[in-house]
Image (cartoon, rainbow, N blue to C red):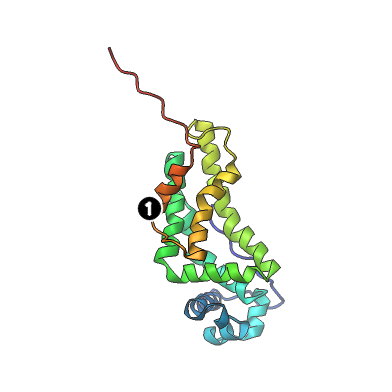
Amino acid sequence: MPAESVPAARGPGRPRSSRTRTAILAAAVDLVTEGGLAALSMSSIAARAGVSRVTLYKWWSSPGAIVLDGLLDRSHSSIEHDPSASARDAIAAQMQALITLFTDDGPTAAAIRAVTARAESDAQLARDLREHWHRPRREVAADILRRGIRSGEVRPEIDVEATIDLLFAPIYHRLLVDHAPLGPELVDQLLALFNGFAEPAPRLTST
């Protein structure tokens, strides 16, 4: 399921230019990467993108919403998975894709930190973050786990939503708090703590 874009607060006038939109989103993500939240305002984004603030307010409600939209544009592929993979491999791949996104793409990591921080004081941005960043990712993970339950790969008694929290929350915690390295080894460590995968059936030996 592809990630969604933040719905723009559209006003009257001509449809947005894709070139202008791309310039605005790039400007917002660049500003956050360079200077964090302090560098982010409608004025600074407009100046960097070469547009007017009126243009920004026609399409977005706040600077944070622009950054979130730019973030979604950069990260569509990070929630895709192979439907033929086992439940464990599919979940592991989704976890690894998120870690790779945060560790290999500095602007994306800076943007998610900034948007998360700004969402504390911006109720609309908080809703957008939940609806357009977190919800699609959680839905994909939930689909993988429920498919695993149906196939017998995942224990049927697990709580799907709690399992998603268990496996993915530590990734965000390390990104936001930076108390420990965020690396690929974390995937195996977290999956080892999760006991919801069914044990493989024992092999029958010939006599």
**Residue 101 against residue 186 in the figure, above or below:** below
Residue at x 58% of width, y 84% of height? 46
User: Viewer-proximal residue, 42 or 113?
Assistant: 113
Mark 1, residue position = 185
**Residue 169 against residue 82 in the figure, above or below:** below
The image position of residue 31, as x and y in percent, is: 51, 80
Residue at x 48% of width, y 67% of height? 109
Give the quarter of the figure containing the C terminus: top left
The image position of residue 98, as x and y in percent, is: 46, 57
Visible residue check, residue 82: no
Going by the numbered disc 1, the residue's amino acid type is Glu
Assess disc 1: are there few (<14), some (14-19) or many (≥20) residues with their C-alpha within 10 Å of its C-alpha: few
Q: Residue furthest front?
A: 179
Local SS, label 1: helix
Visible residue check, residue 59: yes
Residue at x 65% of width, y 68% of height? 120
The image position of residue 57, as x and y in percent, is: 67, 79
Q: Name the quadrant containing residue 5.
A: bottom right
Q: Is residue 42 left or right of residue 167?
A: right
The image position of residue 130, as x and y in percent, is: 63, 59
Residue at x 52% of width, y 59% of height? 172
Q: Residue furthest top?
A: 207
**Residue 195 against residue 25 in the figure, above or below:** above
Q: Residue furthest right?
A: 12
